[in-house]
Amino acid sequence: MAVAEIIPPSRFETSRRLFLKRGFGSPGSLAISVIVFVVLGWIAWSFLDWAVLRAVWRQENVEACGQGGACWAVIDARHRLILFGTYPFGEHWRSALAALAIIATVVLSCLPAMWQARRLAALWVLGFASYYLLMEGSLLGLPQVTTDGWGGLSLTLFLFAAVVLLGMPMGLGLALMRRSEMPVVRWFAMGLIDTIRSLPLVTTLFTAAVVVPLFLPSWLEGDKIWRVIIAFALFFACYQAEVFRGGFQAIPKGQVEAGKALGLGYWSILGRIVLPQVFRHALPSTINMVVVTFKETAIVTIIGFFDILASGKTAFGTAEWAPYYIEVYLFVAAIYWVFIFSLGQYGEYLKRRMTLSER
Amino acid sequence: MSKFLAAGAIVAASLAAPQMAAAQSETVKQIEERGTLLCSGHNGSYFGFVEVNDNNEWKGLDIDLCRALTTAILGDPTKNQIVPLSWAQRFPALQSGDVDVIIKATGWTMGRDTEQGLQFSLPYFFGGAQLMAHGDLGVTEASGLAGGTICVEAGTTIERLVANYLNTENIEHNMVSYESAAELRSAYLANRCDAFAAWGPFLAVLRATEIDNPDAHVILDDQLSAEPIAAAMRQGDENFVDVVNWMLAALLIAEEEGVTSENVEEMAATPPNPRVARLLGAEPGIGERLGMRDSWAREMIAAVGNFGEIYDRNLGKDSPYKLERGLNNLWSHGGVLYAPILD
């Protein structure tokens, strides 16, 4: 008996007791809890009933659709359109491999073992080159697919990865320029950041996609997709620069001065003293920016790209599948969730890893 | 700027060779050099006009017209490239040369024709705003909706059209706006509105496909507007407009004369009348005067069929939508489509 009193109750036991006490302790809270649980249970049950029990899964059984259950047959029939857009049907393996290349590149970049400028640069060049070679194809002797035909999940992932990977160094550069001691550089960075931030993303992208070719010479024009990626990356960089600036401001001046007193140069102070702390301070907002950017890639639909959301809309844009748009939206939402949830979890891991030194 | 260049090139060309009757269009020349025709598609679909099938291939009325034009110019229906464009992007994309022509359910308006620097072809489709109401109300025209609730999509031209029309006709009504077509549809189906207003063909498609009992809903007779839908091109290349116009004309003449994708070779070998002979290139003229091959119309009809076949396949009786021809029939069958004279 004495032993039981000394050992503190487990965390599970504590929260269970707390739950029972707070939720069911008094008649009032008991009533509220019961009502809440009944309603929640009813919602969960109706969803389960709709999405699983009465659902139609296979394309062959499409006649059974529309009788109160979900019609996942639309996904069965149209998933390749949702995942790959209008990429030629026989070449989908290329689009799938290219998407895997981007995922692998992003996952590898997230591993601490890769965090050296040379390794990261090699990885990114390799990752993006394999994506381009597979998708475009003519350099590998495969049938050529121009960027107009790129679409679906592969395009969304590519846009996201390219924007973040280009935008992150650009953002850091802008943040440093904004702290520069040379007024011209400082004013330029401030002007650029404030201009881009005061324009909606849609306007920026529309300008890059549609207006720029009207005045650029055709040899400088490049493909629409590159112009859009650069504009999007610039947009990302301007916000990210402000995130970094917050990180810089959190560092006491004395550290830089101490570095100088020790005779360290600008780059040594920056790379060994300032930046590691800046990254740590800026981490939560950076993860936030990255997640928002992943979702914002859907905006490219207004300049005619077939990102995964636009492909989804096309999937139910025909007479046969028109009634089942909810199923398609749920499918696309699930895909977004998988990626964004993983990003969030990675952010949590980074935070734990970085705060180890502070414990 | 490219517009000025193009205009300059045309001026230079007309000074250099004023005697040439069959001046080839600059745009056609570019298309031939490139080997593909760049057409507009739509990201996100547009029932019957632009869709993507289960094999990720484009289909629809607008797509078939693009294929027809591709066959006419390049002799091969597969040599087109569909560039997905959003609504807002289509005109700038045409001006910057991302596409050669816009065939995308685009209405012919004065502003587009003048300020936006576009040229339009013959209209190939007529459709306007209409109202759909619950059948149990027993109404057949808008006056029967007095005192009712009418739902529209917010911020569209339809919203303004409905208000204008009902106010002019002195029909009392409550208007409720919804942000998206999906919301609008579910509000209507949940009986929150007595009627809802949208583009006629869209209503018909909706009634045919998404509503369990199509007979329980009526599309009212009132035409709130009639928009001529036409292909749009850049200003400054009249010869290209000629090509697109005669492409549409040839499809209509073929339908009038009963030339179909199946009997076109027979008809070309033994033309029943001089008009068919000229159309199919058995008598010369149809190609040379446009700077093209004499066989272009024959190849085009063999590839995509005549206008009636294209309509039936995508919107009409062979499609899930079963849309009546109505206004979009030949003049000889009570519609308003007619071709210029092939002399």
Image (tube, helix red, strand yellow):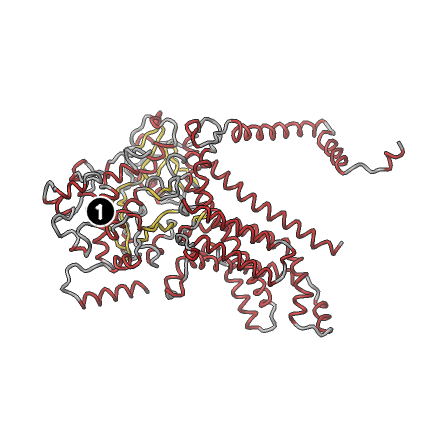
Q: Is residue B142 visible?
A: no
* Residue appearing at x 65%, y 67% in the figure: A270
Q: Tag 1, which secondary structure?
A: helix
**Which three-letter amino acid code belongs to the residue tagged 1?**
Glu
Q: Residue A137: x, y in percent?
A: 43, 54
Q: Considering depth in this image, is A330 or B162 the residue closer to the camera?
A: A330
Q: Chain letter for mark 1, please.
A: B
Q: Residue A274: x, y in percent?
A: 67, 65
- The answer to which quarter of the image holds residue A167 is bottom right
Side of A3 relative to A161 (left or right): right
Q: Considering depth in this image, is A70 or B92 the residue closer to the camera?
A: A70
- The answer to which quarter of the image holds residue A257 is bottom right
Q: Considering depth in this image, is A346 or B229 the residue closer to the camera?
A: A346
Q: Residue A90: x, y in percent?
A: 41, 45
Name the residue that disc number 1 marks: B299
Side of B69 relative to A257 (left or right): left
